[in-house]
Amino acid sequence: MEIVFSDLDGTLLDHFTYSYEEAIPGIEILRQRSIPLVLVSSKTEPEMKILHRELNLDSPFIFENGAGIAYPRNGGSFKIELLGLDTGSLFDKFFLIKELLGTPLKAIGEMEADEIMERTGLPKEIAQFAKMRRASLPFIMEKDTETDINYLNRINETLKEHKLIVTKGGRFFHFSSIDANKGSAVKKIIDFYTCPEQSESIKTAAMGDSENDIPMFNSVDIPVLIRRYDNSIIKTGIDDIRITEKSGPAGFTEAVKEIFL
């Protein structure tokens, strides 16, 4: 059996328009081969339900960077599994991040819909959904501060004592429980698809473009780094990671073709 995990913003969806048009050929290849496509994103559950329905998927999806998993049920409903602390508890601990970063921060829950729309380009209804967090806390730095994976690793060494972590996405930083990440959620999905009776192993691939995709890359057989809209790539520290020539959803389709055709 084979499973494909895909980040959304900047990977399956265009960074600016949120269109998945260029990803459709890749999605159709997976559909024709009965390969589950598992959406993995920092987006909220209601945001992802819309896309899940548009793409006519019947696989689980991972929301809030792995803080939650939605398993489809008959009749169109979902069974929800949350990992780690809820958003209210995380907000109570937000002062830890402020002290460590030493710069003014603003959580997404403190933003009006208009500000979220301006920062993301989302329509108002979806911008409202983006605030409906259950087990994660996206935030921005209100002053420009140079950050890279090494900088975040130093911050997270301190946060580890509190079982918390900060990751970096395409537009926001994300504060969550240390075990509520894309890698942990991906492993749960792999277990979900694993049948005790089957002898064949499950082959897994994952596509993403941001630092918060690294735990997902480390949890699959074939990690694929998608080029960003400006043709740049992040540093993952993974020696055998594949890197696409194309960016965004076109890069997603490129990766699917190279792996499965």
Image (cartoon, helix red, strand yellow):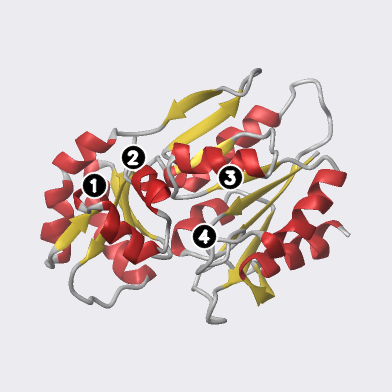
Q: Residue 47 carries which label?
A: none
- Mark 3 residue type: Leu
* CA separation in Å, label 3 and label 2: 17 Å
- Which residue bears the numbered disc 2? 133
- The x, y position of residue 92, in whole percent, is 14, 40
Q: On the picture, is 25 further left or further right than 230?
A: right
Question: How many residues crowd around disc 1 within 10 Å: few (fewer than 14), some, or many (20 or more)?
Answer: some
Image quadrant in which you'd find residue 158: bottom left
Question: Element at badge 3?
Answer: helix
Q: Residue sitting at 75 percent across and 68 percent down?
A: 254
Which residue was labeled with disc 4?
9
Say left or right for 90 vs 152.
left
Q: Which of marks 1 and 4 is nearer the N terminus?
A: 4
Label 3, residues with CA under 10 Å away: few <14, some 14-19, many ≥20:
some
Q: Give the amino acid type for the residue marked by disc 1 in the picture.
A: Gly
Instruction: Name the residue tied to disc 3.
Output: 51
Q: How far apart are marks 4 and 3 (CA)?
A: 12 Å
Q: Quick check: marks 2 and 1 in contact, CB under 8 Å?
A: yes
Q: Please report whichever mark, 3 or 2, sits nearer to the chain's N-terminal start.
A: 3
Mark 2 / mark 1, whichever is N-terminal = 1
Q: What amino acid does circle 4 point to?
A: Asp
All told, the count of numbered labels is 4
